[in-house]
Amino acid sequence: MKSVPKPEIVPAGEGESSALIKQLMGYVAERRLRAGDRLPSERDLAEQFGVGRNAIREAVTSLQTLRLVERRPNSGLYLLAEQEHGSLDAILLHSDLGIPMNEEEVGEVVELRRMLEMQAVTLACERHRPEHVARLDAALRLGAEALATGRNFAAADEAFHLSVVDAAGNRLFRRLVNSFYLFTRKRRVHYFENGERAPLSHAQHMALRDAIVARDVARATAVMGGHLQALGSYWLTLIGRPQKDMEP
Amino acid sequence: MKSVPKPEIVPAGEGESSALIKQLMGYVAERRLRAGDRLPSERDLAEQFGVGRNAIREAVTSLQTLRLVERRPNSGLYLLAEQEHGSLDAILLHSDLGIPMNEEEVGEVVELRRMLEMQAVTLACERHRPEHVARLDAALRLGAEALATGRNFAAADEAFHLSVVDAAGNRLFRRLVNSFYLFTRKRRVHYFENGERAPLSHAQHMALRDAIVARDVARATAVMGGHLQALGSYWLTLIGRPQKDMEP
DNA sequence: GCCGGGAAATTGGTCCTACCAGATTGGTGG
DNA sequence: CCACCAATCTGGTAGGACCAATTTCCCGGC
């Protein structure tokens, strides 16, 4: 039998195994280490965290893949110039881990999402085909169901927005947007824990769907703009607040 | 002494250490493994590739961070639904490794870059400040120097475009674009090995700089559009050709 | 006092063995 | 035919042992 235990996708550093990634990023954050600074050796880190060197190496490998850490053989581990390089996942991981962000960083996240969504809805208007409309409608049904049953609206929200991106017809672009949604999932769930928000979002989704189907770019972007407005102000209320504050 | 041996930033799976990543991706590509398929166990892979299990685990950790592979404890390694999830770095890594892409994929890469650059130049027009102009000019000087000395124009090209993104004033956005440039660097170097291309690009850069400084969004986007046109047609000539063909 | 050189310590990179916990598998006995 | 248990296989982890290259430091010679 080929039972699929957990098809759920999860950001890079999730689960207990990669708790070390969080610990390492916390270590860096606490000590205010800056780009170019050297970290303790793998052996030291292993001792400090009470784990084997193997586990440390795995965590460092992840951070290296995210372009946050550089390994210099016979020298040590160094923080990479975070501002310059560093993958998109890396900074989004910060948000996902609940590392506080300042106003500027939050603003940049919100703005980048706005850029991506606006582009998506524009392309969706121009290119969507019947099967895309079907997916939009399926996502809307999911939303209506969530509203009816009182379930959290986050999954339906994701499904709808990704359907829009699907309609844009660029799978690479879709991946990019998906990264965004992946790493902001916790925030989104929290956002919709306020039950008043879901109905409004759902209504805007329906309006958006109609505008896209009508290929009315102006209307669609206008609706999307208003839709993202509410999200932007929500994010701004989170400034400096670690994610732990979300669910007590 | 704190000598810095190699401050050069390099994509995720570079250097000899991560040759295993390429081997693993090649293994998947050769066997036409699809999303959800199971890979051999770590022990088997270690034996097949003639390395220790440790090395395999490190490579798999990278692929996991790129969301290409999923580890299911007590079960095995599974290819993740590549279409759905998978980080931007992951697909760009394909290009960087020289894995052939079909016309659709190439088109998507070109289009995504176009979207990002257009957005960048628009924002740059609106927001640029004096220091950004200085950086644009510095990049232009680099380009002029490369033209004069006959050096490859790729670095100067990168510097200029990243200066434009800098002027857009969103560092998260800058990271995103930087990822793009990081993983397409080899292609860019190859592109400018044809000496006729650099002068044209440089001229367009200068025109772009003037339009940005004049805050003339229409002109700037027009110039950028034309600038990217040439690049797009170059990329299309690479369809199905592995990167090895680039420098023999 | 200064300088040179070599030994020792340190670093990441790799391999190996061993064990664990959970899942799967396969056979065995009811 | 089904229930149950043991063997097996999986990734996860710890720890030891090297290697090669670099750095550090002390000691001897000048």
Image (cartoon, coloured by chain):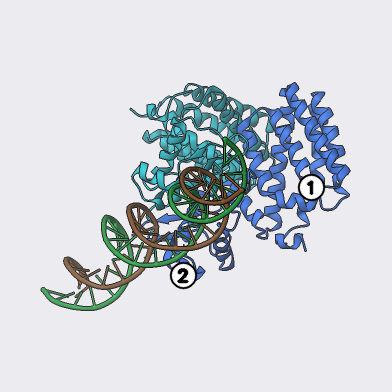
Chain colours: A cyan, B blue, C green, D brown
Asked whether residue B63 is in view, the answer is: yes
The quarter of the image holding the N terminus of chain B is top right
Q: Looking at the picture, which amino acid does disc 2 mark?
A: Glu
Say whether residue A79 is left or right of residue B75.
right
Q: Are marks 1 and 2 in contact (CB under 8 Å)?
A: no
At 50% from the left and 25% from the top, the residue drawn is: A235
Query: Label 1 vs label 2: CA separation?
Result: 43 Å
Tag 2, which chain? B
Instruction: Residue A225: name its quadrant.
Output: top right
Return the x and y of residue D22 as percentages of the image width and height.
57, 49
Q: Is residue A232 above or below residue B91?
A: above
Tag 1, which chain? B
Q: Earlier in the sequence, mark 1 or mark 2?
A: 2
At 71% from the left and 59% from the top, the residue drawn is: B243
Asked whether residue A124 is in view, the answer is: no
Q: Looking at the picture, which amino acid does disc 1 mark?
A: Leu
Q: Element type at marker 2?
A: helix
Query: Toward the viewer: A131 or A92?
Result: A92
Which residue does the numbered mark 1 point to in the structure image? B231
Say whether residue B30 is left or right of residue B40.
right
Q: Residues within 10 Å of mark 2 (few under 14, many from 20)?
A: few
Return the x and y of residue A70 as percentages of the image width and height.
55, 45
Return the x and y of residue B24 as percentages of the image width and height.
54, 62
Which residue does the numbered mark 2 point to in the structure image? B47
Q: Element type at marker 1?
A: helix
